[in-house]
Amino acid sequence: MPDSIADAGWRFDNSYARLPEPLFSAAPPVPVRSPAVVVVNEPLAAELGLDPTILRVHGAGVFAGNEIPPGAEPIAQAYAGHQFGHFTNLGDGRAILLGEQISPGGRRHDIQLKGAGRTRYSRGGDGRAAIGPMLREYIVSEGMHALGIPTTRSLAVATTGELVLRNAPLAGAVLTRVAASHIRVGTFQFAAAVEDDRLLPALLGHAIERHDPTAAEAADPALAFFTGVVERQAALVARWMLVGFVHGVMNTDNMAVSGETIDYGPCAFLDAYDPLTVFSSIDQQGRYAYANQPGIAHWNLARLAESLLTLVHGGEEASLEAVRGVLATFPERFDRHYLAGARAKLGLVTEEEGDRDLFAMLLRSMHEGQADFTATCAGLATVAESESVSASEAAVPELREWHSAWLARLGRQPGSPAEAAARMRRVNPVVIPRNHRVEEALSAAESGDFGPLHRLLAALRDPFAETNENERYRGGPPAGSGAYRTFCGT
Ligand code: AMP
Ligand code: MG
């Protein structure tokens, strides 16, 4: 059968399943009643070496967990984690790793089914997911990817033909997630907490091979690996801050050592700029508020440091000293990425002492004037081109004074304003996954209309170009919409 799903181009390796058993357990997906494909990411399929047409036409069984593609060895991964500061044993309670697809370029990608049934780690949960949260992850992760921000990807969403019981009965669905790996800070916490001396070295070796091959040659591989994770997280969280992304549930089990954004639950993007923004209904203390994210990343990395301690060379004190030294570099690494990104958003190519304050002042003015973060940044290119503050007359009054200071700063660097504007248009997106547009697509999808979903996905694919088609996706929510709230999508 030339057109069978088995011939889609699967090329699985299962290196995680060769690690010591306590790190995972076998977990066959639980078949569902009536699988149907809602969306397939055809460009991603092609990158993975999979035939997009075969996936679209024949993929329902695989994407819902009813068929196992050749070479896959389904497992659930064990992990622990600090959830809102409290340590818990977790593991994939509703996610099943099919294996690692080796792409034509030789890259290794975890292929995971989220919502594919109960596993050994399900505790009281049903192992299932509802269509809304799975499409939400698809939309936002693909939006992040288009923004150039490291993230897990979404290959497909399939409905199950079964209901899941949440506050109300909802249509069940499975998301096929693609990741550089699903190794979390919490995976190391699990390996360090279990009394089995094999786990930590095996996990570290595996993670190094996948994410930091050069660390294997370093004088102290564990320390070199830790340094790599610190650097990737500093870069990642800086990128989030610069597009107004609020992850919403930065527990240590939701932080990947690969440096990819992972576990899109209650996440959302800022509309009006307010550093204290919290979207998640369960984050009552505001632990994971927008402005807290760098500090939380640093805190999470301290948990990783503790977990790696026994693997770092030297005696107890020397290794503690060493990891502390690396951990202490997080703020300056974050700051370096953040400042470079801020300069780019402002169109600056030279460095001046006052640039940090200039950006901070922009944020303050936006906050005071309740200006939209994305639209304000995107509008700067037009102000630069016209070289006059009057172009912003219609905008927030708080910003006018700032514009003059910034235009003066632009005038002190080489290159024309048009060049600056062109550079800025490459880094300041006009389209992000706006909360009200995401909700619009999800509620239509929940009642069986997938048109808005596909139109939103199309608009998100090219977030930097202002086009006729993406006009309705550029603006913030209608005035008076009230504070946006998200709910943990379980
Ligand atoms: P999350 O909040 O999605 O990061 O999930 C936290 C933990 O709860 C993870 O161990 C999940 O696997 C588990 N979990 C979430 N939803 C379910 C569910 N419906 N059934 C079983 N386990 C779940
Ligand atoms: Mg999670």
Image: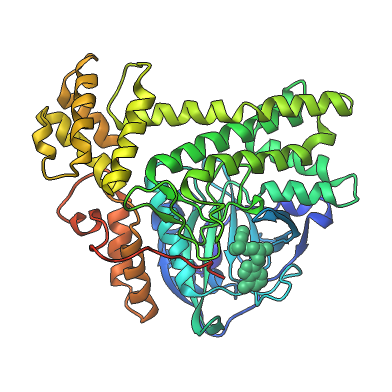
Res 445 → quadrant: bottom left
Q: Is residue 3 visible?
A: no
Is residue 32 shown above or below 390?
Answer: below
Q: Residue at x 83, y 56 (%)?
A: 21
Is residue 35 shown above or below 26?
Answer: below
Is residue 93 shown above or below 303?
Answer: below
Is residue 327 shown above or below 257?
Answer: above
Residue 11 x, y percent position in the rendering: 60, 53
> Nearest the camera: 301 or 60?
301
Could you tell whether 404 is left or right of 290 in the image?
A: left
Residue 64 x, y percent position in the rendering: 55, 73
Could you tell whether 273 is left or right of 216 in the image?
A: left
Residue 289 x, y percent position in the rendering: 50, 51
Q: Residue at x 67, y 48 (%)?
A: 183
> Nearest the camera: 20 or 46?
20
Q: How many marks?
A: 0
Q: Can you tell me which quadrant of the image ligand 1 is in?
A: bottom right
Q: Is residue 4 visible?
A: yes
> Nearest the camera: 29 or 335?
335
The quarter of the picture where the C terminus appears is bottom right
**What colouring does the structure picture have?**
rainbow
> Nearest the camera: 274 or 454?
274
Residue 228 x, y percent position in the rendering: 63, 31
